[in-house]
Amino acid sequence: MRRKLLWRGCGAALLVCLMAGPVLAQPPGGGGDGGGGGGEGGDDDKSGPDMHAMASRINATRVRKDYSYISRPAGDRIQEQPDLDRLLFWSKDGKPDGYAQRRGDSVIYYDSAGRASRVQHLAPGQGD
C-alpha cells in the first residue's frame, strides 16, 4: 500500500516538473515570440517581435508548403517557417522587411517593427 502511494506521489511530482519546464524556459520578458509585447508605453526600441530571433528558431521538421497565395515584396529574400505558417521577408542588404503569417482563413502582413500592416482574407479552399 505504501509503495503504491509512493509511486503515485513520484508520478505526480514528475508530471508537475514536466509541465513547469516550458514555463520556466521562457525569457524574463514573457511571451515566447522573442518580442517585447505590443505595449504602447513609449519604449519604442522593443515594440515588436525581433525578426532575427524569429529567423533563428529551428524548424524541427522540414515540411514544404505551398505559399503561392501570399504576396511577396519584389526583390526580397524569403525564409519559410512552415511549422508556424509564416514567411519572413528580408531586403537585399540583409535587413528585416517584415513577415506574413497565416491565421485561420486570413493572412496577416506585418512590417519590420512587428505591427500589422494589412490583412488578406482567403477564399474558401485557397491556401489549403
Image (spheres, rainbow, N blue to C red):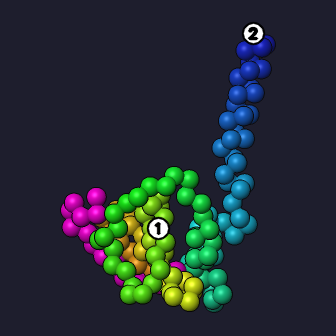
Indicate the quadrant where residue 6 lies. top right
Please give the residue where the numbered disc 2 appears in the rendered image: 1
Please give the residue where the numbered disc 1 appears in the rendered image: 80
Image quadrant holding the C terminus, namely bottom left
Indicate the quadrant where residue 116 lies. bottom left
Identified at 49% across, 72% down, the residue is 79
- Marks 2 and 1, how far apart at CA: 55 Å
41 vs 34, nearest the viewer: 34
Identified at 73% across, 15% down, the residue is 4
Considering only vertical position in the picture, is 8 above or below 88? Answer: above
**Neighbourhood count class around disc 2 (C-alpha, 10 Å): few under 14, some 14–19, many 20 upward:** few
Q: Earlier in the sequence, mark 2 or mark 1?
A: 2
Provide residue 100's location: percent of width, then percent of height: 42, 74
Identified at 66% across, 44% down, the residue is 19
Identified at 72% across, 54% down, the residue is 24
Give the amino acid type for the residue marked by disc 1 in the picture. Glu
Provide residue 118's location: percent of width, then percent of height: 36, 82
Q: Secondary structure at mark 1?
A: strand
| The residue stretch that appears in magenta | 111-128
Q: Secondary structure at mark 2?
A: loop
